[in-house]
Image (spheres, coloured by chain):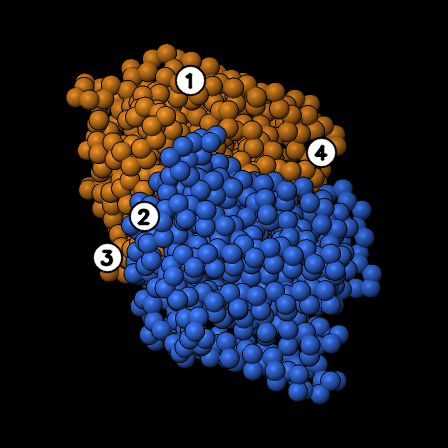
Chain colours: A orange, B blue
Amino acid sequence: MTAFPWITFLTFLPLAGALVLLIFGGLGKSFARYSALAFSFAALVLTLILWLHFDAASGSLQFQQRISWIPALGVEYRVGIDGLGLLMLLLTSIVVPIGIIASWQIQERVSLYFSLVLILQTCLFGTFTALNFFHWFIFWELSLIPAFFLIRLWGGPRRASAATQFLVYTMVGSVAMLLSFLAIFLATHKFDFIDLSAMAHNGQLMPAVIDKLDWRRFTADHLALIVFSGAFLGFAVKVPLFPFHTWLPSAYSEAPTGTTILLTGAMSKMGVYGFLRILLPIFGAQMQEVLTPLLWLAVATVVFSAYAALAQKDLKRIFAYSSINHLGYCLLGIFAVLKFTGGNTSLIAQKYAAMNGVFLQMFNHGLTAATLFWFVAMLETRSGGLRGLDDFGGLRKVAPVFTGLMGIALFSSLGLPGLNGFIGEFLIFKGSFPLVTWATSLAVIGLLITAIFILGILQRVFSGPLNQRWAGLPDLTMGERLALAPAIGLMFVLGLYPQLVLGVVNNTVIRMVQQIKF
Amino acid sequence: MLAWTIYISFLGAAAMLLLPRSSAASARILALITAIAGFAIALIVFVHHHTGEMHTLIRVPWIPSLGIEYHLADDGISLTLVLLTGIIAITGILFSWNIEERTKEFFAFYLLLIGAVYGVFLSYDLFLLFVFYEIVIIPKYFLIAIWGSTRREYGAMKLALYSFVGSAMVLIGLIAAYVAAGANTTSLSQLAQFPFSPHFQMWAFPLVFVGFAILAGMWPLHTWAPTGHVAAPTAASMLLAGVVMKLGAYGCLRVAMVLFPLGLGPWGFHVLGLGSWRDVFALLAVIGIIYGALVALVQKDFKFVIGYSSVSHMGFVLLGLMTLNQIGISGAVLQMFSHGILAGLLFAVVGRMVYARTHTRDLAALNAMNLYKIIPFAAVTFVIAGMASMGLPGFSGFVAELMVLIGVWRAYPLLALCVGFGLIVGVVYVWRAMQKAFFAGAGTVLVPPNPPLPPITIPERLGATILIATSVLVGLYPQLLLNIVVPALNSPLFEGLRKGSWQ
């Protein structure tokens, strides 16, 4: 299992699929659809094999591969996964087939569409496995290009501005991050995340950077904060964290729904992943210094986005804001872990809980949000593109199965115990409360409002008197039910037996939390 | 052997005049064969011998009474630029396949230009270098004035005048150095070792540097570049932006900085926070980066966008040189190569694939055609070229800008932040131009081009593929060029620079 470069193979498998699609695009639409699906399933199978061979007991980086690349720049090709990477690979492998199935109705330039989806998958795999800044950044940036064109060419009426806004926002963050990493490289001559984490852990990193930059106008502390804020901006835009979130609602709602699934299910995790893999180990000390403002931002993200969702009329925009809200909990958990470091181990169990919650929440949100948007896609196909909150009413009478299954997904998003959404949020709140009581208490408001708008959707779309316009709305076909079954089933499985995920990531969590010591 | 790149190009130009007047096809093929032969020689040398160190090709006395020699030599930096010239020469011909008017003369001038450029990159005698440098101006002028488009006489004249002014400044500086040294030699390596007085260097350095930097498009002396690029026919734009601008940057590094390293040192006093010529030129370079990008952002003419983007990108080269550290300067050399390839590609798309078909460069008119449905190959090429040009990782531009930025962080942290701003504007103008030129907005009334556009030809596809592949190759494996550039920078020729202000 070790000799073969599994991760590299997995990363480039979808890209190979994209090339096949581009070359044989002339063979027709169904060929493109089915071969895209086949490639994404192949990636899923491969990820599951990795999952089975992953040594959960160690929690360290596995399936590593290191090749010297550009010695002059300290660049190596280095990949590997721990529990976090593995979880993200699995999530991506699950979300991409969902996105492909939900895009089945795309009629224009089908092979190009699906090859862009597969290219995006390669970029995601690359981002989640790369351990050297250089090729990690290649994947991180390149992922924007397929996403941009998926929105720009197949999106809704305001797609041009949405796509541009998405690209420019993310680029601003990326450039800031690049500058920070170049400053770090200048001082350490290293681009390797693991080496940099080790230096930060020993407290050598920032002194070296400050010494090398020698920028007299600023004190050492300020300089360290400047370098940190560059990297922070890159990830904060991606997650997104309030107030850097404004690109997201229009991008999510203008994108074709199949693409929105990829954006919310997998791509939004790139930001949180960056917080965990890069910011926390490398810039932990700086984050701790500005912990209070960061917590405020997390709370604002949670509360404001929930309020914004309450005010929306468009289902896609509601779920877009709800996505921001759910990822806000992840950041709350991450920031909470930074409280009380330095020898104080009394609350370490709470930190494990919060961090486990963050991991679960990332996975659960990916699954639930992808499924919810999938339902929106099916609703749009039936209604001819309508997806407003007030366009429907009483659908449960004509489409009971649709209502029931979407209800399950909605309740999962709301965090009903027994479904997957609950356990992640519960662990985050349980862990964060003793650590950062005020922030956690304020974040509870977000939970309440989420409950209100989710129930509002159920009420206005599915119950009440039947809107006669939809009297002939077809219920889910057998094929759709079968396609949905695994996703809905997984919600129950994870809700009742979260150990399935926790067992794999727990040791990674412990290592990660123990690394935070300054 | 590398010297043959020059001779072959000149021979090809001469042979071109012997061809029968009517035969356009034979002229094209002859030009292509000549260009490929030149590139093949460079490639063989690159693969076989190269360690990057200086290596004399030929050295014979030329005018012994003045100490002038015919001295050709190459090192890693020259070779990098010779390779670039070879690639641009080949692809430029592929993108000129549609020239029907006076084809023979066109390619004769073209090969003359190429030969002279090879000559500049390989000269180690300052007089010889200057001769080649002047030869470049003449074919450049005629290529634009005869085969150009919008305001071609103006563009050609402006370009020629700027070049002559620059050359005059260089000439004065070089003669002064020749006299001051009093050693009766124009050999670069010998003059580089002569200890010119700091006072002399302090005025000779800016004179020669600015003389060369005019051709590199340094702000505020850049104005010839956009008008010249726009007026020129596609192949000439490719050569101008791809290679000729590099002559200027090459001169700055090879002549000005090597001869007068102390000119970069501190003045001993500060004006507006600037304490040396180095600070001044670094600041001008950054202004060029940002100004070029901002102006590109508001252009209505597609070709002007690319013209100003060249000013912006050449700013990275000059900034890299002014960092005076190994990583920054090698980044600058890499950026010369990268910008040559990408500017060539962008001008090819704009000039050949779009303008030659639609006969308009107005972004609003192009937008109404929704070109990505009509000529998808051009759209895809431009998207890739644009991605590379805005410094997306995986392409050559990224590595080059990355290295320059690392150097700038060390030398001028504040300017690094300004450059970051420039990078973001770079993303925006490329993306704006791309959307306007190829993708109609949702509410636009579509005006399909009439008559229908001819499809993209095989030579165009081939040329675009060569340039994209080169950019990706260098982007993913920059070591290929760094292996020869870094040893060149560590060679004795740059010793004065390393001693003087090197960090």
Residue B155 on image: x %, y %: 70, 57
* A121 relative to A514, above or below: below
**Between A288 and A440, the one nearer to me in the picture:** A288
Q: Which residue is mark 4?
A: A470
For the residue labelled by badge 2, is the local secondary structure a helix, a strand or a loop? helix
* B110 relative to A31, above or below: below
Which of the chains bears the disc numbered 2?
B
Quick one: which residue is furthest to the right in this view? B450
> At label 1, which amino acid type do we have?
Trp
Asked whether the residues under marks 3 and 4 belong to the same chain, the reply is yes
Which of the chains bears the disc numbered 4?
A
For the residues labelled 2 and 1, say whether their Cβ atoms are less than 8 Å apart.
no
Q: Which residue is mark 1?
A: A296
For the residue labelled by badge 3, is the local secondary structure a helix, a strand or a loop? loop
Q: Which residue is mark 2?
A: B500
Does residue B284 appear in the picture of this structure?
A: yes
